Image (spheres, rainbow, N blue to C red):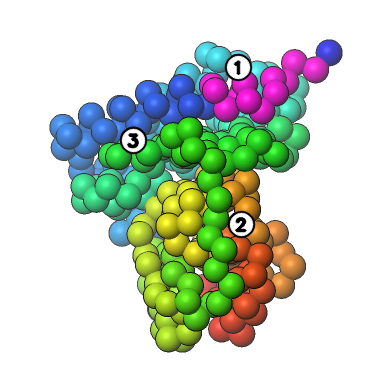
Amino acid sequence: MDSTPPPRELLEMAIDVARDAAATAHRMRAEGVSVAATKSTVTDVVTAADRAVERQITDALRRLRPGDAVLGEEYGAAEHGTDAPARVRWIVDPIDGTVNYLYGLPHCGVSIAAEVDGEVVAGVVRNIHTGEEWTATLGGGAWRDGRRLRCSTETDLGQALVITGFGYHPGRRAHQARVVAELIPQVRDIRRLGAAAVDLCVVAEGRADAYYEKGLAAWDQAAGGLVAAEAGLVIGGLKGLAPGPDMVIAAPLALFGPLHDRLAELDASGGP
Ligand code: LIP
C-alpha cells in the first residue's frame, strides 16, 4: 500500500519545520553570527547557524517521516535509516543567501522541498527576517501568505527587470560579469539580491519579470522553482537542457525565448 502522503500533507509538514527553522536562524542572527568555515572559496561561507538549522530541519523531518531521504546543502544526503529506496526525498537549504544572512541583509530564507519519485511536488520558502512565506504544490498553485501568485505578463525583454546571481569562483564571476555587462543595456535593469530561492519567489509574484543564474544546486532551486512554475513562469535551462547547475532561467512565456536566446548567444552557461 502506498504510504506516500499527498503533496498538501507534505507541504504542511514542510511549513511547520520551516517556521521553526526560520525562528532559530533569526534568533541566532540576533545573538551574533560569524563564519564557521568556508567551502568552494574563501568567500563561500558557512555559519554555525547554517549547520544548526540544517540539523534541526533534518531531525524534525526524520521524526515526522523516518524512512524518507534528506538532501541538505551542509550535510549532503543524510542516511534515511533503511535500505529500501525512499520514495520521498526532502531537499533542504537551511539558509539560502548565507552571505546576506552573515551581513544582516534581509534577503535570505529557509527552503524545504519534498520530492516524490524524483519530482518536486511541494515546497516552501520562508524569509528569515520578514516572515514572508511562499508555498506551492504541484498543480496546486503558488501562494504567499494566503494570496495566489501570478507572475509578470511582460512581453518586451527591453522592459524586463531581470534578477541574476553570481558564483563564488573568481573565474566564474568574471565570465558572469561579462555576460551581465552585455545584457544590461538590453533590459530594463538587473538586480542581484543574493538568494536564489527567494529570488525565484520574488519573480513568481511579479516583483521582477525574470531570473537566470548559472551554478545553482538542487537545494537552491527545488522549492523556489516549484513556486515559480506554479505562478506561471517557464523554468528551463539552455538549449533544451533541464534547469540545473549549468543554467536556470525563469521567465514568463513571452520572455523566455528572447532571454534564453540572448543568454545562449552570450554563452551564459559557459566559463569555469
Ligand atoms: C546563494 C544563492 C545565490 C547565489 C549565491 C549563493 P547560498 O546560495 O542562493 O543565488 O548567487 O552565490 O550560491 O550559498 O547562500 O546558500
* Residue placed under numbered mark 3 in the picture: 131
Label 1 amino acid?
Arg
Q: Position of residue 264 (x, y in %)?
A: 63, 79
Please state which amino acid type lies under the numbered disc 2. Answer: Leu
Disc assigned to residue 233: 2
**Distance in Å between CA atoms under marks 1 and 2:** 31 Å
On screen, residue 108 versus residue 240, left or right, reads: left
Q: Position of residue 272 (x, y in %)?
A: 51, 73
Q: Nearer the viewer, residue 143 or 20?
A: 143
Residues at marks 1 and 3, CA–CA distance in whole angstroms: 26 Å
The residue at the point 30 percent across, 33 percent down is 25
Task: Give the camera-side residue of 149 and 79.
Answer: 149
Q: Which residues are magenta?
A: 2-13
Labels 1 and 2: the sequence-earlier one: 1
Q: Is residue 5 magenta?
A: yes
The reply to whether residue 107 is visible in this rendering is yes
Identify which residue is drawn at 55% across, 50% down. Answer: 150
The disc at residue 65 is: 1
Q: Which of pointers 2 and 3 lies earlier in the amino acid sequence?
A: 3
Answer above or below: position of 81 versus 55: above
- Mark 1: which secondary structure? loop
Structural crowding at the residue carrying mark 3, measured as other residues with C-alpha within 10 Å and reported as few (<14), some (14–19) or many (≥20): some
Is-magenta flag for residue 94? no
